[in-house]
Amino acid sequence: MVKVKINDIEVDADPKDNCILAARKAGVEIPHYCWHECLSVVASCRMCLVEVGETKPDGTVAMGPKLVPGCQTPIKEGTVIRTDSSKVKTSQQMTLELLLLNHPLDCSICDQAGECYLQDYTYKYGKAQSRLDEPKLHREDKYHIGEQIALFTDRCVMCTRCVRFTREVSGTAELQVVARGSHEEIDVFPDTPCNNKLAGNVVDLCPVGALCSKDFLYKKRVWWLKHAQSVCTGCSTGCSIHVDQNENKVYRLRPRENPQAQGHFMCDEGRFGFKYIHDDRRLKYPRLKTATGHASSAADSTPAGDLSFADPWPTILGEARKRIQTAIQNDPSGFVAVLSPFMSVEEAYLLASFIKGIDPRTKLTLGPVPVVGSDDLYPKGPKGEPPLPSKVKFTIRAEKCPNRLGVEAVLRHFERSVIHAESLGKSSASAWYVVGGYSTGWVNEKLDQAVGTPSLLIVQDIFPSPLSERADMVLAAGSFAEREGTYVNHAGLAQAAHASIRPPEEARADGRILMELAGRPGLFNAMALRKEIASTIPELSAICVGDLGDHGVRLAKNANQPLAAKS
Amino acid sequence: MSQSEFKPVLLGRIDRPDSQSLASYRADGGYEALAKALKMANTEVIDVVKNSGLRGRGGAGFPTGLKWTFLPKDVNGPIYLCINGDESEPGTFNNRVLIEEDPHQVLEGIVISSFATRATTAYFYLRYEYGRCYRTLKKAIDEMYANNLLGKNILGSGYDLDIYLHRGACAYICGEETGLIESLEGKRAWPRIKPPFPAIEGAFRRPTVVNNVETMACIPHILKHGPEWFQSMGVPKDPNNPRDAGSYGPKLYCISGHVNKPGLVELPMGITARDLIDNHAGGVWKGRKAKAVIPGGLSMGFMTNAELDTPLDFNGPGRVGCLGLGTAAVVVIDDQTSMVDVLYNACRFFAHESCGQCTPCREGTAWSTKILERIRDGRGKLSDIDLLLEISSSIGTIPGTTICGLADGAAWPIKTAINKFRGEFEEYIKSGRRSESPVLAGAH
């Protein structure tokens, strides 16, 4: 640690920090466009110019004669940084005036408005009027630049973050700078659009409204969006994300910086893969097979206003509890519960402890773990080859579920081993409680046959499936955006996800269903449950803090627990 | 050595028949300096060059020998020497004449310099537009390989060197030291941020020295005649200024513009601009007077007629508000020419050539061009003059707002033109007249 002074505020900073990071520690913002923690330093936007000096042994301060870029300038013991001198302020004003020279000032129709660094910095450091008297330079917008991204060329400040991202992080190098001087533009080679699996990140990286997500384009003004901290459930990487919603509709997912999980970015599969939560085919009402044997009395097609289904949950859950207990009493070892790797640790714990609490001879199993291809490593080499293990900056994992490790930890505690439901063989049990929650069709042939047509089948899921079609009871559950809980990623990092929206119509978040089913008093409270789980399951003792914070908590690695080895 | 007894050194052979051939160069004592250098230790060669006081001829005037000593002492792996032949400063053509007429003089300098710097590969970065230079150099390099002057074990000394001739990427910025390196690596010629300096991490991330063609041409002569001979020419150090490194040796002055006899002359450093124009370029054409003179390429700014007695050495132009000696390309502008037109042309060039990396230069050069365009169109405002000055004083490495010196070069013509000819600009704007004179193209 070295002592650094920023505008007379003294802070301890890491000698590896640049001026921007050191100033951040002192609570001083040094405005910047081109610099980004994850990308190489180019020092070209010249927004972060500051005055830097050093403290001489006799205590006097010798300031350098020139302005220097804060992003490129290292610090050492006694470095003095000034961001409030008239020299710095004049330079900031001039740089902003120059950046806005050819900018169309179309904030009123720009998606970035509200989270735009041109707006913010101009407000804080710029001046109100431009002295440009001549017509602005106009360059054509490029809607073709990528399947998911559009370039509004005029709004670009040429920070080249996007170009460096495709070269340094995705390794696909589609984006480049063409032409020279003020005619410069970001572009792609003809017929080589920026369609890599990480392309959506350039939209987040773009500090202005130049690169926009086509998916989000003109959908919502950003100041209406409410943000919830969550975890992407697309794969076992478990990227930290923000879920941005308004009026119960999710508009976009954004990566949330987490050095413990994935870093700064997320993949497009996860970013745009949330659409299923608003799918019309979602299960919206609980269903109970009628006495006539005809399924779906409380069918999804039933209008919400139908009085006979106005409040079916207490009835259905009471009935479910009764039937589960009866089934277990009749044939305890013939009762199988299937836990999904899409469940949170809390939900898995609630179900497992409920079932095992009735009779320990019941069987808890793990549902199908979706695996697609192999892990996708970035940055890619020139021929698309994966990088060396030491150079990996981002991984899209083949295991397409968020919480296999967390659910397995619960299963190991209650069942002493992890049994895969698919391995049970044809019609192996008389009663089944099956939890889904997958984003895609998940009931494979093996599982379908293993379940067969038992005397009791209860399905808790978000989409209709072959199992829900023949189930005695269907409990319409919640998607990841609707539930709260803990997910354990591939590396044993337990992260908290928060609910951002309500489930559709009469569907309920899984936690709430299970609390009531288990007959536990009170509301579902993830924090309280985490403490209970930590004291019950040693493997998960690390989550005893309750609040897992922004970055999550790493589970202790223990030789007896095959957590890391199995990932 | 006085001016009258000076005999051309660098241009000494250009009138010989077949001056480009190896045989002719050898007949005039060519490659003797190389043979001599190869018998010395490489540090001794550096010392000779250092003692001669040779300063880089590319524009910045950095002492060549000192630059070579910046290379790390213990290097594992190759060191590279890059020859900057991307001559694109408006008004400059000395490299072209040196290469086209006496390529072996330059190449001998390159081999000696490579030996001194322990470089095993030299990259000759040649301006793309110089087709004849390319062909001449290619032929000369082939001759050298055939005669054991390049390749393995040069002249039996055990020293190996390869020269790669690389044609440039047609942009002014490719002549900037690190822009050149980027371009050589096959990238956009965007100047690099420093540190690391090229001597530590240059071409292909290896220690690299970048030298100008004219600097290279001086090297064989220094080796042959010694540092004292070199210091007998030019302007000695200013004893009152400990930072002055002196301006020694012969210099090629390119004279163009409104003179009767434009061309290239070789003289000891320190001739005044007036002497140069009147006695070596046949005076200003059509009996007119010089209104403004560019001392060393467009980016150095303008001198007025009253400042023409300034000596053209490394310090002279700076004393009258110009950026420096630059490439010593003197461009004369007669008294019938509007400075508004001249400045517009200058700004247009720099706006066209700005690489676009740093915001101040990218936008500032284009903006000043737009303002001058409007002034020439009769729609100028008096406030434009101060705006131009403000733009020019806020771009460049001197205030610290850009990575490379292109912006300084773009700012200086504006600053000097307005500070020295402000009355003319004010009068032009007030008259509301529109300029009809054609706009000349820049370097490209």
Image (cartoon, grey):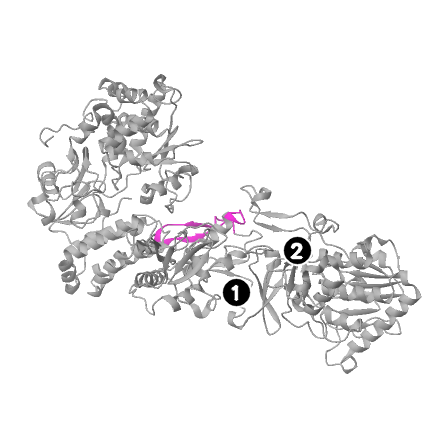
Residue B2, percent from left and from top: 10, 31
Residue underneath mark 1: A217
**Amino acid on which disc 2 is placed:** Cys
With B7 as the anchor, is A385 left or right in this view? right
The residue indicated by pointer 2 is: A235
The chain letter under disc 2 is A
Instruction: Specify start and end residues of the magenta stretch as a single range.
Output: A168-193
Please provide percent x and percent y for residue A456: 87, 66
- What is the number of the mark on residue B249? none
Mark 1 burial class by Cα count in 10 Å: few <14, some 14-19, many 20+: some
Which tag is nearer the camera, tag 1 or tag 2?
A: 2
Distance between mark 1 and mark 2 Cα atoms: 26 Å
Q: Are marks 1 and 2 on the same chain?
A: yes
- The percent position of residue A344, horizontal first and vertical second, equals 71, 63
The answer to which image quadrant residue B59 occupies is: top left
Q: Is residue A363 visible?
A: yes
Residue placed furthest toward the right: A330
Q: Which kind of residue does numbered mark 1 sit on?
A: Leu
Badge 2 crowding class, 10 Å Cα cut-off, few under 14, some 14 to 19, many 20 or more, is many
Is residue B233 or residue A12 the one in the foreground? A12
